[in-house]
């Protein structure tokens, strides 16, 4: 095919695509590969219409046909977003000096695609890399192309993705466009889940009002541990637990070793006796420590409450993020300040009440 005939055939192809499709049609697709195949079949149909029945192509799509479809799609996007630049360049005119694409020295290639002129003409890079195809930053198909590369490169990060895309495409403000796509990728989010946060709540009465020693106590166990009662040969390991007492008002901590056959009440009584000795610290505590609690050490920013029906990942301490269950946000339990910190979520099999610090809202909700 001569260069002139090629140009004419490209023009017909573009006219057909432009005349038939609108940007909304492309928005129906969620995969660039699928979009390319649909357009390739469409172009084949248009070509077959002008051929005798025996010459028509009917078998699987060829690489050449898919490349042709890709060019048609790219041309459509460029005509849609850079209509002014297309009219200048297709007429062989220079862009006005005020045009924002001037630094890229764009030019019109033989197929009617705007490519970046750049400064790499004398390099040994392939032509497509020296002069990548110009694409806008906000376009559904551009997002599909980025997603396609992201998946082909096994969920590559923004930097690698940008380097790979630049071998063929020059997306304006590529960094932002790429980050936007990667941020919304669910498998990537599952690998680095972001937890939901709420502004830290006001402290409960038991933490900020004077009270008797250990009147309100937090209790936890750590262990089991193996300890020896004496050094040397013959001493046996004994299993024990460490009982942690925390006075809610004074924040005093007391550790007590607890053997598995020891009565818990004995340990608890000892703890109460010891903590009574700390009573005289109360005055110092209220003047020196209480004021420190005024600030919110974390979760300082007021965030938007979750909406009913939002999808969340539910953190499970003993399994990796990829195995965390998906849940649907069902009901809220607002605190005294109106902020929601505890919610009811429904998974595939059951319902749970969870603190929102253990939930990661999926990026598709925003
Ligand atoms: Zn990903």
Image (spheres, rainbow, N blue to C red):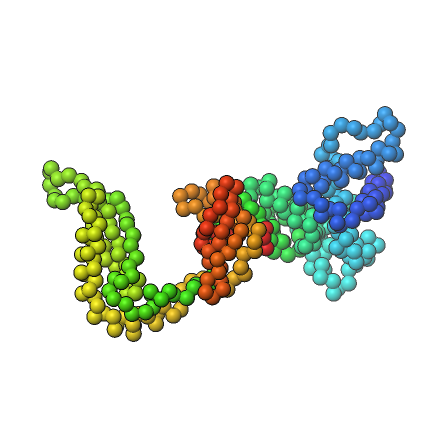
What residue is drawn where x is 26% and y is 44%? 224
Vertical comparison of 302 with 156: above or below: below
Q: Which residue shows up at 40% across the image and 64% down it?
A: 297
Q: Is residue 255 above or below residue 228?
A: below
Horizontal side, residue 56 vs residue 357: left or right = right
| Residue at the image point whose x is 59% and y is 44% from the top | 150
Expressed as whole percent of the image width and height from the top left, the position of residue 32 reads 68, 42
Front residue (pair 270, 325): 270
Where residue 256 appears, x then y in whole percent? 21, 53
Q: How many marks?
A: 0
Say which residue appears at 40% left-offset and 43% top-offset. Answer: 318
Dividing the image into 4 quarters, which one contains the C terminus? Answer: bottom right
* Residue 190 appears in the figure: no
Q: Quadrant of the N terminus?
A: top right
Residue 259: x %, y % from top left: 20, 45
Q: Is residue 256 left or right of residue 13?
A: left
- The part of the image, by quadrant, that contains residue 137 is bottom right
Name the residue furthest top.
54
What is the x, y in percent for residue 339?
49, 62
Which of the 4 image quadrants contains residue 100? bottom right
Rendered position, 16 above or below 179? above
Q: Tell me if residue 270 can be seen.
A: yes
Q: Nearer the viewer, residue 70 or 87?
A: 70
Query: Left or right: 124 with respect to 345?
Result: right
């Amino acid at each position: 095919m001569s260069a002139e005939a090629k140009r004419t055939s490209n023009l017909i192809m573009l006219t057909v695509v432009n005349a038939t499709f609108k940007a909304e049609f492309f928005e129906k697709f969620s995969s660039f590969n699928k979009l390319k195949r649909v357009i390739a079949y469409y172009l084949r149909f248009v070509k077959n219409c002008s051929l005798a029945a025996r010459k028509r192509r009917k078998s699987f799509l060829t690489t050449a046909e898919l490349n042709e479809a890709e060019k048609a799609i790219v041309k459509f996007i460029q005509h849609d977003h850079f209509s002014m630049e297309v009219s200048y360049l297709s007429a062989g005119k220079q862009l006005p000096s005020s045009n924002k694409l001037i630094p890229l020295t764009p030019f019109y290639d033989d197929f009617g695609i705007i490519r970046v002129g750049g400064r790499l003409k004398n390099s040994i890079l392939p032509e497509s890399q020296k002069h990548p195809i110009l694409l806008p930053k906000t376009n559904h198909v551009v997002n599909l192309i980025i997603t396609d590369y992201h998946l082909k490169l096994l969920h590559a990060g923004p930097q690698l993705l940008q380097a790979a895309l630049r071998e063929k495409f020059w997306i304006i403000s590529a960094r932002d466009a790429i980050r936007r796509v990667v941020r919304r990728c669910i498998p990537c989010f599952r690998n680095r889940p972001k937890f939901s946060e709420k502004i830290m709540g006001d402290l409960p009465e038991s933490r900020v009002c004077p009270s008797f020693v250990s009147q309100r106590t937090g209790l936890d166990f750590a262990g089991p541990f193996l300890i020896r009662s004496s050094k040397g040969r013959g001493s046996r390991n004994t299993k024990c637990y460490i009982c942690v007492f925390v006075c809610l008002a004074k924040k005093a901590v007391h550790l007590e070793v607890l053997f598995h056959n020891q009565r818990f009440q004995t340990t608890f009584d000892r703890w109460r006796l010891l903590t009574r000795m700390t009573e005289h610290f109360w005055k110092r505590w209220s003047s020196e420590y209480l004021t420190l609690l005024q600030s919110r050490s974390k979760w300082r920013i007021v965030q938007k409450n979750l909406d009913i029906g939002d999808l969340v990942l539910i953190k499970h301490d003993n399994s990796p993020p990829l195995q965390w269950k998906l849940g649907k946000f069902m009901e809220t339990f607002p605190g005294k300040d109106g902020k929601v910190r505890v919610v009811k979520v429904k998974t595939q099999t059951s319902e749970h009440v969870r603190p929102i610090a253990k939930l990661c809202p999926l990026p598709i909700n925003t």
